[in-house]
Every structure is written in structure tokens, then in C-alpha cells.
Amino acid sequence: MQHFLVTAVTMAIVLGVMILIHEWGHYAAAKFFKVRVEVFSIGFGKRLFGFRKAETDYRISAIPLGGYVKMSGENPMDEHTDDPGEFLNHPRWQRFVIAIAGPFMNVVLAVGLLTVVYMVHYEYPAFVDQPGVVAYVKPNSAAAQIGVQPGDRIVRIAGVENPTWEQIGLKVMLSPNESLPVTINRGGQILEKAITPRPITSSEVGSAGWSPEQSIIVADVDAGMPAAKAGLKEGDEIVAVDGRPVHVIDALIDNLQETKDRVVDVDVVRGNQHLTFKLQPVLADTEDKQKRYRVGFESTARMKVGKLPMVDAFQRSLEDNKRYSLVLLELIQKMAQRKVSMRQVEGPIGIGSAIGHAVTEKGWTPLLGLTAGISLNLGIFNLLPIPILDGGVILLLLIEGLMRRDISLHIKERIYQAAFVFLVLFAVTVIYNDIVKRLPLGS
């Protein structure tokens, strides 16, 4: 219960700050161009409390799923006058700046937060920036079907030359059931192949079935499961099962499916000690809602720790935000083309779960990094060319600029009505998927 309350409060603070920054961007730009701002609201719906200063009502509203800045004359369906304080009486370029200022501030926040994280302390799995050398191929996987072998090096995938494992993972994740060209170097021999990742987990992300070499470090140990009963502890490194070395968690999982409930010897390194535990796997549920033989622990890879000077941290933050933005745009494009499932989009429950996990990690940099990611998502989403969103306003302004006249109020009214229905349906779908992915009987 305490963890839930901490997560809920942290989530409210994180989302509140991002919404505040976003709306402040619109507000500051509007004030700069002398557009009258009537309402600055965090949340939608009924006004709960706030204060009025000069011409603006600063308020907290009942529905905490966003916020808005209401400017005089902003709504095309409202009655308009020649008042210079009205939004529509300003030049289109000024309205463009006001519209883009909100998403821009979210991107600035993302870049700033990541810069701080990279300056102070950041951790990442040691394998993600390593070349794509395959350490393990899951039996009957997409990689196994095209003949990928341990020791193969992926030198090109979907146009990316000499990819790291992070780049490989992103390409595969966003391409379920989609054929990807892949070039493999096998001992100097170049092989041209095509792999079709399979959708896995309730989010239906793509999986190739190949894995990099990575240490198996015990993270959380499930109470009452064989690992806990035998005495495994957080931080233990598993190095062998029944005398056979294991360097990939998938290899360990597949090994347990073969041995089933037979007792296995698990060799562990704990500090300077080499220990052996006898574990009897049990058939239990997994996160992807399947029954598998498990010993009851979550694993993590060996981590690298970084700390950069300010200029280098800022440069890396810019590069990472640019790369993540392109990944987001690719995801949106593939969803529009129905190549990936809407289940890859996380809603309020998924965001809350991620925040709750970040809160439990050591230090405050994991939460800052997650906040940066959410802020970037919010900025990119608001730039989509959907009327009502900032991107829709920008699109209509560009169309009107090319036409050299305003779109008729009747057409705008119909456009906004259709956009509102679309956004409501989108929100309902995301929340529904959010719930279904976490139901015991979900798929």
C-alpha cells in the first residue's frame, strides 16, 4: 500500500511537471506576442481551485490527464472582434510559434534532464553498445529458422550498418511479422538473409530469438520459490547449470524447460565465493502469461556506469533524444500502417508501472531518465498532425498559408469534431489495452 501511494504521488508530480512545462511554453509565447490568456489549467473539466491574476485564471482542474491554455478568440467557432488580444487576429507565424512552443518545451525538458543524468550518474546494460555478436540462438525461433549460429556477427540490419545491440533490439521490436534484411559475418563469410521477428508478450513486440552475451545477475528473488528457499540472493551471478557455463538468461530459461522439475545444480559467484545450489524448478506463471518451469528470480545484466562532463553530456543527450524521436516516429508510422499493434503503446497504467519501478531503483537518476523519456513522448505526440493537438493547429496554419486565406469556419468545425472523436477513441483503446495486458487471462 505504501509503495502504491509513493508511486501515485510520484506519478502526479512527474506528469504535473511535464504538463506545466508544456502549457507554460504556450503561455509564454502567447504573452510575448500580447495574446490575452484567459485560463491556464493543469487538468481538464471542473475547476477545483486556483487563483486569478490580471486577465488569467490559474487553476487545477478535476481530470488530471493533461492541461490547457485558453486564449481569447482561439476557438474558430467563437464570435470574433477586432480586439488585438485575440489569438486569430495575430499573424499566422506568431500563431505557429505559440502552437509549437508547448512541444518544444517538452523536448527541451527531455534534453535537459538527460544531460543532468549523464553528468551525474547513469547506468546501462554493458551489452547494449557492443557489436551485434550472437551468443545464443533460441531453438525454433525466427533466428534459428534462418540458420543464425552463435558467434555470428550482425553487420547490417534494415539498413543500419555495424549496429549495436541497442539498435538491433529497436529494429526487431518494431518489426513483428515484418521481414527485415540482415547481413551476417560468419568467420569472414558474408551471408545475406531475411528475418521475420515474431510478436511476443502481451505488448506484441517483435522477437528474433538471438541474444548477446551478458552476465546473469540475480535481481529480485520471489519469496516462496525454489531460488529463495535455496538461499540465492540479489547480486549473485549465475555462471553454470549442471556444470555447463551459461552467459545468457534465455539459455538458462530454455535449459529449465528441458530439465523440467528435475533438481539442477546452479553455480553462483557471490563476491569472492563460488557456491553451488540445488534447485528444483516448478511450473509457474510468467509475465507473458504462460506456464513455464521457473526457479523464481528476476535477472539483470552487468551494468556500466557513466559520468560525462557537461558538454559531452549535452551532446549525448541531443543524440539520444534525436534517435528516440526517430524511433517514436517509426512506431507511429507502423501503427498507422497496421504493421505493429496498438498494444505497444503504454497508457496511464503502464506509465504508472514504469514510474513505480523507477522509484524502487537506487538514486534519483533512473526517475529523471524516465521522466525525460515521457516528456519526449508527450512532445512528439502533440506534434502529430491531428486537429485539437498542437500539430493539427500547425498543419491548418500551414495549409492556410499556402492558400493565402483562412479555411471556412464550417469546415474547421467539422475537422475539430472528427478529431475529437478520434482522440477519444484512441484514448479508450490505449486504456483498454493497458488493462487487458495486465489481466491474468490477457494475451
Image (spheres, rainbow, N blue to C red):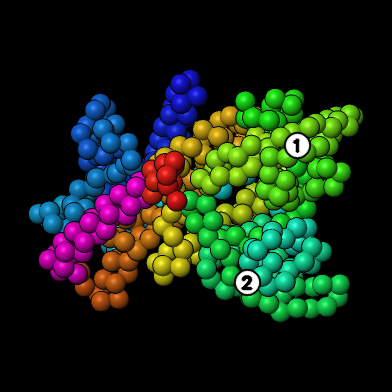
Numbered circle sitting on residue 67: none
Residue type at numbered disc 1: Val
Secondary structure state at the residue bearing disc 2:
strand
CA–CA distance in space, label 1 to label 2 = 36 Å
Q: Nearer the viewer, residue 81 or 75?
A: 75
Q: How far across and how far down the image is residue 324, in percent?
A: 56, 56
Residue 313 in the image: above or below residue 337: above
Segment colored magenta: 407-432
Tag nearer the camera, 1 or 2: 1
Q: Which residue is mark 2?
A: 195
Q: Nearer the viewer, residue 295 or 236?
A: 295
Q: How far across and how far down the image is residue 117, in percent?
A: 64, 40
Residue type at numbered disc 2: Ile
Q: Examine the structure image and report whether residue 426 is included in the region drawn in magenta.
A: yes
Q: Which residue is mark 1?
A: 263
Q: Nearer the viewer, residue 213 or 417?
A: 213
Which residue is farthest left?
79
> Does residue 58 appear to the left or right of 324 in the view shown?
left
Q: How far across and how far down the image is residue 437, in percent?
A: 43, 46
Which residue is farthest front?
262
Quadrant of residue 260 in the image? top right
